[in-house]
Amino acid sequence: MSDAQTKPHETVDEDRRDFIHIATAATAVAGAGALAYVFVDQMNAASDTKAASSLDVDVSKVPVGGEIRVLIGGQPFFIRHRTSAEIRSAQNVELSALPDPQSDEERLVPMQSGEYNRAILVTSGSCTHLGCVPVGPAQGNTGDFGGWYCPCHGSHYDTSGRIRRGPAPSNLPVPDYNWVSPAVINISL
């Protein structure tokens, strides 16, 4: 049989062939995308790890003039209930005299009402020099400025967590936190 004499059922339907090729390619792309999603999604943190990256803290339990220390995701944080004298001391510092100038108010997070609870200060618990954990009122040593003292290398922080003396290059960082209620804060990484 020659090409000119093809039987009717052997004719090539080019539209049908093109549709089959397009449908096959689309299915392959969708399958590859689904497989890629599974591989990428497995790199995300597990739900128990995500849960360990935030913490609600009842700050009403922190005694005036004292602090508590919490670990979130393996990182230490200080929650200090400052006295009126400590707040005044932090507010009366000449900012130009600070190695890392920052006002006391800049280091606080407003409550839901928009007001500041100046008594509660939340900072990272890692010295900004080499990551040591400074001591504070809970350990009986507040350094020369009433805040925290890193005995490893001699960094002194004031009652607002600002570096005042020593090799630390910057203030104790203020973590991301928000006020859940007037007595509870949520710290998250």
Image: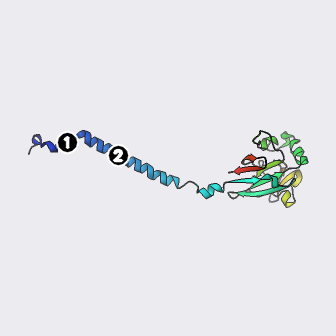
Quadrant containing the N terminus is: top left
Colour scheme used in the picture?
Answer: rainbow
Residue 35 position, x and y percent, is 44, 53
Name which residue type carries label 1: Val
Q: Dot 1: what SS?
A: loop
Q: Dot 2: what SS?
A: helix
Q: CA distance from mark 2 to mark 1?
A: 20 Å
Q: Residue furthest left?
A: 1
Indicate whether 72 appears above or below 111.
Answer: below
Q: Residue at x 84, y 61 (%)?
A: 139
Residue that badge 2 annotates: 25
Q: Residue furthest right?
A: 85
Residue 174 position, x and y percent, is 75, 47
Indicate whether 122 appears above or below 102.
Answer: below
Mark found first going from the N terminus, 2 or 1: 1
Residue that badge 1 annotates: 12
Residue 53 position, x and y percent, is 66, 54
